[in-house]
Image (cartoon, rainbow, N blue to C red):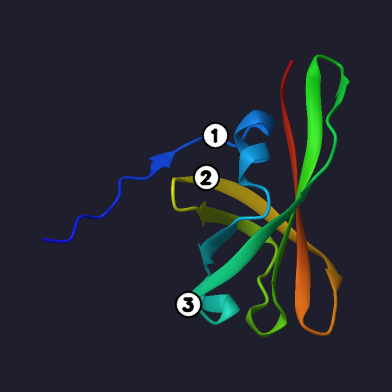
Amino acid sequence: MTMTPIRRHMEPTYSGLRPLLGSEVTVSASVLDGGGVVPLTLEYLSDPVSWGGAMTYSLRLTGPVDARLSPGRYEVVHAACSFVLSLFPVADEVLHVHYESYLSEPV
């Protein structure tokens, strides 16, 4: 009998994302993006900046150029958890597209 691991859905927080850096995740592309599952790597988490009672930071993800995602909200699935991010393409290379998600949370 094969058992499927239970993933917990979480709100993305700085402390929750930090341990996931360097790991692979997937998102389901929309029909407008060509559909399918797109692999991404959690590449970089900026240092948080606190102001106005909130802590803001950004998360950069890298994916293949042949499965480009449109700007929008995606459910990001990791082996241990899942969470929703708004992703925006910020840089293109020959083989990769870099996406950024801008996040904030109360201090």
Q: Is residue 84 left or right of residue 81?
A: right
Relative to residue 17, is residue 37 depicted above or below? below
Q: Quadrant of residue 55?
A: top right
Q: Amino acid under label 3?
A: Gly
Q: Is residue 71 left or right of residue 73?
A: right
Figure quadrant of the C terminus? top right
Give how far across and how far down residue 85 sits, in percent: 62, 48
In three-dimensional space, the C-alpha distance between marks 2 and 1, rounded to whole angstroms, equals 6 Å
Mark 2 vs 1, N-terminal side: 1
Question: Badge 3: few (under 14), some or many (20 or more) residues near its Cα, within 10 Å?
Answer: few
Give how far across and how far down residue 74 sits, in percent: 56, 56
The foreground one among 96 and 18 is 18
Give how far across and how far down residue 94 sits, in percent: 83, 85
Mark 3 vs 2, N-terminal side: 3
Q: Amino acid under label 1?
A: Glu
Q: Which residue is rendered at x = 68% and y = 69% of the image?
A: 70
Q: Pointer 2: what residue?
A: 83
- Do residues under tags 2 and 1 come within 8 Å of each other at their CB atoms? yes
Give how far across and how far down residue 81 sits, in percent: 45, 44
In three-dimensional space, the C-alpha distance between marks 1 and 3, rounded to whole angstroms, equals 24 Å
* Badge number at residue 11: 1
Q: Callout 1: helix, strand or loop?
A: loop
- Do residues under tags 1 and 3 come within 8 Å of each other at their CB atoms? no
Relative to residue 96, is residue 62 depicted above or below? above
Mark 1 vs 3, N-terminal side: 1
Q: Callout 3: helix, strand or loop?
A: loop
Q: Pointer 3: what residue?
A: 36
Relative to residue 65, is residue 71 depicted above or below? above
In three-dimensional space, the C-alpha distance between marks 3 and 2, rounded to whole angstroms, equals 18 Å
Q: Which residue is rendered at x = 85% and y = 78% of the image?
A: 93
